Image (cartoon, grey):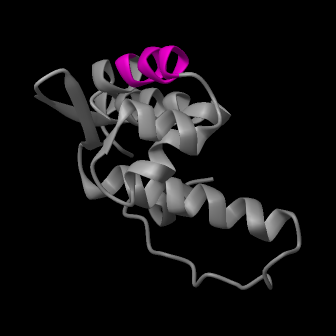
Amino acid sequence: MPEPDDVRRAADALRMLADPTRLNILWALMQGETSVACLADLAGTTPTAVSQHLSKLRLAGLVTNRREGTFVFYTLADHHIGELVRQALSHADHQAGRTEAHQQPAAHVPGVAAARSRR
């Protein structure tokens, strides 16, 4: 089983993805560094709302920022965040029937087979 702290951190990250506006912001940031104004246009909301969401995402460690004069530019903290967004949106496509369902091979998870055999 994963370490409890790792499970908590993963749950915190997934909680941040559970908002449509934040998901749109993160999707836009997958394309590269972007300003608040540009993110507001892409997400279809106000710069104030985007700034509030970005503040939460930054505190959660999902995005980073840099200042250039009066402008603030944001980027994803690491490639894992983009992969989470990509997988979540791919899952949504599958659920909506827009992409063909496919089977994933079962991955071996250490300890699971042993726990099952003890039952």
Q: Quadrant of residue 75?
A: top left
Q: Quadrant of residue 73?
A: top left
Q: Is residue 45 above or below residue 112?
A: above
Total of numbered circles in the picture? 0
Q: Is residue 56 above or below residue 95?
A: above
Q: Main secondary structure of the magenta part?
A: helix
Q: Give yes or no for residue 51 being in the magenta stretch.
A: yes
Q: Residue furthest front?
A: 69
Q: Is residue 53 above or below residue 42?
A: above
The image position of residue 112, as x and y in percent, is 48, 59
Residue in the foreground of this view, choosing between 93 and 2 = 93
Q: Give yes or no for residue 90 being in the magenta stretch.
A: no
Left or right relative to 91: residue 13: left
The image position of residue 84, as x and y in percent, is 47, 54
Residue in the foreground of this view, choosing between 115 and 67 = 67
Q: Is residue 9 above or below residue 107?
A: above
Residue 106 is at least partly visible in this image? yes
Going 18% across and 20% down the picture, which residue do you hit? 70
Residue 23 is at least partly visible in this image? no
The image position of residue 17, as x and y in percent, is 54, 36
The image position of residue 27, as x and y in percent, is 50, 52
Going 46% across and 44% down the picture, which residue do you hit? 26
Left or right relative to 37: residue 104: right
Q: Which residues are magenta?
A: 47-55
Going 55% across and 39% down the picture, which residue do you hit? 41
Going 54% across and 28% down the picture, which residue do you hit? 15
